[in-house]
Image: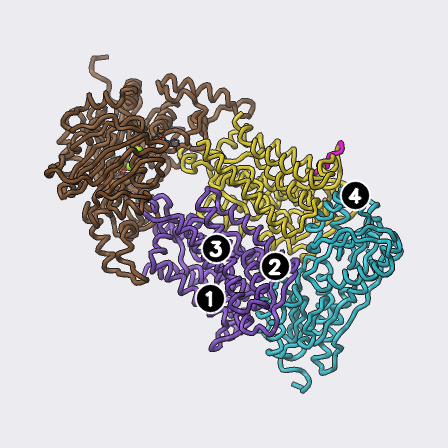
Chain colours: A purple, B yellow, C cyan, D brown
Amino acid sequence: MKNCKAILPLLGAAVLLLAIFRALAPAFLSGSNLLDLAQQISVNAILAFGMTLVILSGGIDLSVGALLALGGTAAAAILPAGGFIAALAAGIGVGALFGLGNGLVTARTRIPPFIVTLATMLVARGCALRFNEGRPMSIALTQETFLALGNSRCAGVPLPAIFMGALFVLGSGLLHRTRYGQHLYAMGGSREAARFTGIGVARVEVIAYVLCGALAGVAGLIQTAQLYSAEPASGQGFELNAIAAAAVGGASFKGGRGTMLGTLLGAIIIGILDKGLNQAGVHFSFQYMVKGAVILAAVGSDVWRRKETR
Amino acid sequence: MKNCKAILPLLGAAVLLLAIFRALAPAFLSGSNLLDLAQQISVNAILAFGMTLVILSGGIDLSVGALLALGGTAAAAILPAGGFIAALAAGIGVGALFGLGNGLVTARTRIPPFIVTLATMLVARGCALRFNEGRPMSIALTQETFLALGNSRCAGVPLPAIFMGALFVLGSGLLHRTRYGQHLYAMGGSREAARFTGIGVARVEVIAYVLCGALAGVAGLIQTAQLYSAEPASGQGFELNAIAAAAVGGASFKGGRGTMLGTLLGAIIIGILDKGLNQAGVHFSFQYMVKGAVILAAVGSDVWRRKETR
Amino acid sequence: EKKPAPDTAGAAGSRFFAVSFQTLNNPFFVDLNDGLKQVIDEHGDRLVTLDAQFSSLKQKNDLSDVIEQKPAAIFLNPVNWESVRATLIAARNAKIPVIVVDAPVPDADLVLAQVASDNVAAGRLAAQALGDARPQAKVAILQYSVNKACVDRVAGFTDVLAKSFPGATIIARQDVKGTSEATRPVMRDLLGRFPDLDAVFPINDPGAIGCVSAIDAAGRSGKVLVVTVDGSREAAQFILNGGIHSTSAQFPKKIGSLAAGAAYDHLAGKPVDKEIKVPVTLVTKANAAEFVK
Amino acid sequence: MNAEPSPPVTLLEFRDIAKSFGGVWALSGVSFDLRAGEIHALLGVNGAGKSTLIKTLAGIHTPDVGEIWMDGRCTPISSPADAMRLGVRVIHQELSLAPNLSVAENLFLGREPVRLGLLDRRAMERAAASLMRSLGFDELADVTVRVETLPMALRQLVEIARALSAAARILVLDEPTTSLTAAESAALFRKLEALRAQGVGIIYISHRLGEISRLADRITVLRDGRSIGTQDAAHLDAAALVKWMAGRAVAEVAQRPAMAAAGGVVLRAVHLRNARVRDVSFELREGEVLGLAGLVGAGRTELARALFGVDALEAGEIEIGGRALPHPSPAAALAAGLVLVPEDRELEGLIMDQSVAFNAALPWTARWLRRGSLDHALRRAIVQRALSAFAVKCANADAAVSTLSGGNQQKVLVGRWLESRPRVLILDEPTRGVDVGARADLFGVVRALVEQGMAVLLISSDLDEVLDFSHRIAVYREGRIRRTGAARDFDQETLLAELTATA
Ligand SMILES: Nc1ncnc2c1ncn2[C@@H]1O[C@H](COP(=O)(O)OP(=O)(O)OP(=O)(O)O)[C@@H](O)[C@H]1O
Ligand SMILES: Nc1ncnc2c1ncn2[C@@H]1O[C@H](COP(=O)(O)OP(=O)(O)OP(=O)(O)O)[C@@H](O)[C@H]1O
Ligand SMILES: [Mg+2]
Ligand SMILES: [Mg+2]
């Protein structure tokens, strides 16, 4: 399959990094360490899945970090009185709602998505800070079902990693096995051309942002459960990490290019890097530099390879 | 002049905001408060001038916040031994150098500037944190010339505001009265067209990033002087503020559209907003929301007006 | 191996320790890190320092990375005192002792010890210094309420102010991250809004320096009293020059060395105090010179 | 000196030029020479390599093999600036203007006048205005307007003016007249003839053979990236030229489909009205071709867009097959059997970065993709049918559609709609930039479908095409249908007169 060939270099990069860190930190490839890696990646990967949809449509979403914080705080606020289901609905719903706003404004006006979602980021952050005066809100230890979202394991695998896997499968299916996916690729490639084939581009675009917002809500729930508390000020800069994962995975800002598999691999590469640099005891200042260099190299090699095969 | 008409709505918005805050906080229009406003705006405006050049070229620069921190720390590190001139050269030079890197990679490869400058942001941040283990570096109170950069006044006007004014004049001249400015607009409007007419588009692009980096260094010097210390971790999120100023001022991410005057007004509007909301005693959570709403409204009205006149 | 050392410990000279700070953009934590490092280096062991950059999730992930490597002990300065519970549980399951430094956590039973300045006392000292100098002060408080240490300082401060100086009034409270960069504009606008504002309590030294800069910019140098907490060299300089009135000095290096000492005591099988409070001292013009050197 | 004409001066020589893109040879051996004071036509079917060759001369591509010789010396050209310095001026097939700059700024792009190091904007605008006057481009008298506000035709004139503004030794025009009116084209030709007389060497590329026979002194034909010969134009008649170029005999006129006995009305437009369409009513019957004749800028594209539901209507009603469309939109139009093939295939037609197969299968997702299950075989079959309808020339169906030549892209664009025969097909400039062979193929396929009952609304700036292929003709001017009549009642002159008549 073509898709498989396209991600071989990414797989190669991941394996290379694993080998390097194996050499630097012998326990790196232990089962428990890899499971821990999967859990750590999950929040960023879930944000990046949503980001991939938006990037495929030719847009960008800077608000996911703030929506993650808002989703978490909303859920934490509802949880004591409303219970588990209501909290889930609140967390995901508020993300989807702001995503709807992003989508409608982007589709209906010509305001660039960068600005639309920057504004949403500020508004959502303000809303999150309304809860509890901006202080963290702890989750009562009795809320076991909710806390399990972030901390339980199923057959030894951390639940967040399982959610990540399930959302990956759903996302891939959406992109490659539904008409919506075809239409998203088409409108990302050329909005006008998609319109002329009868695709309701506004609808396609709005759905991408709604899903992206909802996924940010899911990530917020998971983070809140993991941290036993919701932090209104959390998630700052998460959008850049999610964008980086999608870009490393081959998504193009012009729209119409990118896959869930690529994005997952992008998130994995960034996760390996973060974990490996920590475990190898690299000074935190060098961690920044190495991460910058690896992101540039990964996207650069993808761009270069594509040029070659053209 | 056509230009003047284009910025009338921005002027209107600024005046409206001033009037609103005048009503909420009576001292708002006092001379000292307005001079203070000019000083507070200066760092963001200087970053936004550089950002305007990059946006005109069709790019974006996420690294300016980190370059501001790096420029400041580099200057603070050199200052005790090297003295004032060497510190200035170090602060501006290091910004220009990283800008050169941004420009060369963007011009020579097809890696999107979003990713190039994201990587630079990480690398520059790592470099800044190398100094002094990441702790703030204080400027000795005996370094009066250096501290004057941020804190002196000339004929009652704060020096940072004067720098901002001077850089505005230089920047406007560059854009509208030199061939470089023409070529920058042309390549932003259509890279291919510019290339086909024999313009060295790579050179034009590289220069835009170099100037943007150098201006980030200047901003870093000013901020360091203002705060009596250089903070390696400072400047986070400044890039978004600078981008917002340029966008509010009418710069278009597609390139080829935007002016220094617009950007200056954008920075002023954002500055009035920040200051006014603080002085009106608005809860910090609402400050975020209002700022988001105003940015959206400003860019939205610009987009809408442009569509009308088409 | 001998009996008392827990099974995670490894032999002296080959052990490694990890510490995670909420931020390293504050001389306080860098000094605390130095205190830890000094003791650990003396034993020939290794310390890995992690910077959480004010993100709880990063802190959790960083620590789960090192827990996988089974360090002899973990030192923890939490971003958010509630959000570290999962980390503490993971460490207990891995039988790794955790010593909390500077800011307390609510789950005291999950940690080996807590080593911190007496932050309430630091706030009290600041209020006392302020009240003595200006009993009728109109005060602004720049708090940072995510962090428990900062919350304690404000609690001590308001407590003394209310009890001992009824003439003083708190006219503004703002929440702001304790960096110069974040504090300066907030202070600048408070000065614009309250012409009669004449004292401020920023909860730490970097914040205080931001305040001094804002006061100078507003042309009100010397008219607004700044009292704060930390005792850094930079703040001491400003005390000598009159920009800052007082700072309640903490001894971060001492906190670091005591924490490291507690860890080695535990590894040697000795009992360790659950709570170790490091006293604070008031720094004013009178004694600031000692803190500059 | 005797009376014998002096031997021709060779300005430029291509020697065995070859150029590949990712392993595919766009040029594989092109040689010919250009003399001073001649117009040398470069012909070839779509994808033959004409534009690529020109780009090697302009310094945009560097040839992989071969040399460019000028004035008897091997002259490598590695950048557009080099070409400029050597006196080469090129009008590219794709317009290369900065849309955000004014006409004057575009004219002087890259060689702006400066005074004391600063831009001399006033001198620039003065010079631009006088250039426009001297070229007789009166529509462009105001040189301060931004190019993006100009219609296509005027943009093309700006491009031409730019190439003519500086003294050129070699002038290259790659399909310069695709958007020009007959009058504007004629003015251009006069200018070219004047330059030829001054000794400028001109390379002229066009698919309009009428222009070639009027202008060309010599003709070189490219086929599959090779030059297959150069001949004097005087020795060739139209039919021979077509045969040489296309490699086969091709009918130059589009043969009109046979009109079946009065079919029912399939498309009825009743008092349509929006910003650019001013009260248009007409009917189209099964098996009928209605030609919409108008000048460039008449607003025919806007009418087509309104019919297809891309642009909103302010008033009026569209009926397809007897059923009114309550909320016109492309989806509703397609569901009712109305297809529009848009005029700008790069922007509105195809998704250029996606594969040929993706583009061909896109309108039919509902067939091969159902509830999450993917019918690979059906998709392949759909793609195959779309490509074979016109014998699209492409390496494989997974290649990006942007790598196809313009003509082949156009074939994909039309071919993909034939999967299920539309009731009404609107063709907007279907042959812009398409070679004679492909044009004949296109009209052949459309004719067959019309004879089976499909109705066609044909928009074309090529009046011959409209006259020859339509059953009826609607004269369209300033957003209104002025008159409708049987095609045989019109000829070139009367039609042109009606189109240019002022209201
Ligand atoms: N940048 C490119 N990348 C890949 N292939 C290309 C590129 N440019 C041109 N080609 C290929 O080179 C061949 C020649 O194209 P070219 O545009 O020169 O044809 P042309 O003769 O100008 O055709 P037309 O009459 O349609 O304009 C085509 O097969 C085209 O697909
Ligand atoms: N983006 C635009 N802004 C302003 N006016 C426009 C724009 N696009 C088109 N127009 C105007 O609309 C009119 C019709 O455009 P267009 O050239 O597409 O007409 P047409 O009849 O379809 O011609 P053709 O199809 O032969 O090119 C032109 O006069 C042009 O000035
Ligand atoms: Mg061509
Ligand atoms: Mg048209």
Between label 1 and label 4, give the one nearer the viewer: 4
Name the residue that disc number 1 marks.
Answer: A164
C-alpha separation, residue under disc 4 versus residue under disc 3: 54 Å
Label 1 environment density (alpha carbons within 10 Å; few <14, some 14–19, many ≥20): many
At label 3, the amino acid type is Ala
Asked if residue D379 lies in the magenta stretch, the reply is no
Quadrant of ligand 4: it is: top left
Tell which subunit mark 4 falls on: C
At label 4, the amino acid type is Pro
Which is more toward the observer, B307 or A269? B307
Counting residues from the start of the chain, the first of labels 1 and 2 encountered is 1
Tell me the tag on residue C195.
4
Which corner quadrant holds the C terminus of chain D?
Answer: top left
Position of A16 with respect to D179 (left or right) is right
B20 lies above or below D118:
below
Residue D416, position in %: x, y?
24, 48
Give the residues in magenta: B155-160
At label 2, the amino acid type is Pro
Counting residues from the start of the chain, the first of labels 1 and 3 encountered is 1
Element carrying mark 4? loop
* Residue at mark 2 shares a chain with residue at mark 3: yes
Element carrying mark 3? helix
A271 lies above or below A158:
above
Position of D480 with respect to C119 (left or right) is left
C13 lies above or below C77:
below
Label 3 environment density (alpha carbons within 10 Å; few <14, some 14–19, many ≥20): some
Element carrying mark 1? helix
D40 lies above or below A291:
above
Name the residue that disc number 2 marks.
Answer: A232
Position of B95 with respect to D61 (left or right) is right
